[in-house]
């Protein structure tokens, strides 16, 4: 893909090419790192929810707020 010099995606494309996508677990269609939820696999969720042990409980796609328990 060809980017213009003032396009912010040009920097990401150059770094991905330079490092060979080293250290990231998922890259989207353009080769740019995209955060994914480890619970549901949603791409680029708005927020991640963590517990006190720093484990991911989910994201805005798979965790929702409710007023009542089952």
Image (spheres, rainbow, N blue to C red):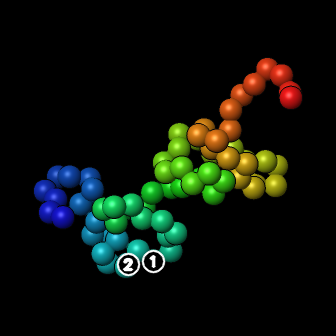
Position in image of residue 18 (x %, y %): 32, 78
Q: Residue at x 39, y 60 (%)?
A: 28
Disc 2: which residue = 19
Between 29 and 19, the one lying in front of the other is 29
Q: Residue at x 28, y 65 (%)?
A: 13
23 sits to left or right of 11: right
Which element is circle 2 on? helix
* Marks 2 and 1, how far apart at CA: 6 Å
Disc 1: which residue = 22
Vertical placement of residue 52 versus 10, above or below: above
Position in image of residue 29 (x %, y %): 33, 61
26 sits to left or right of 48: left
Q: Quadrant of residue 59?
A: top right
Which element is circle 1 on? loop
Q: Quadrant of residue 3?
A: bottom left
Between 68 and 51, the one lying in front of the other is 68
Position in image of residue 1 (x %, y %): 18, 64
Position in image of residue 41 (x %, y %): 57, 54
């Amino acid at each position: 893909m060809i980017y213009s010099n003032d396009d912010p995606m040009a920097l990401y494309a150059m770094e991905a090419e330079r490092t060979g996508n080293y250290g990231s677990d998922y890259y989207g269609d353009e080769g740019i790192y995209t955060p994914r939820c480890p619970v549901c696999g949603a791409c680029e969720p708005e927020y991640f929810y963590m517990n006190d042990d720093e484990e991911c409980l989910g994201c805005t796609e798979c965790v929702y707020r409710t007023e009542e328990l089952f």
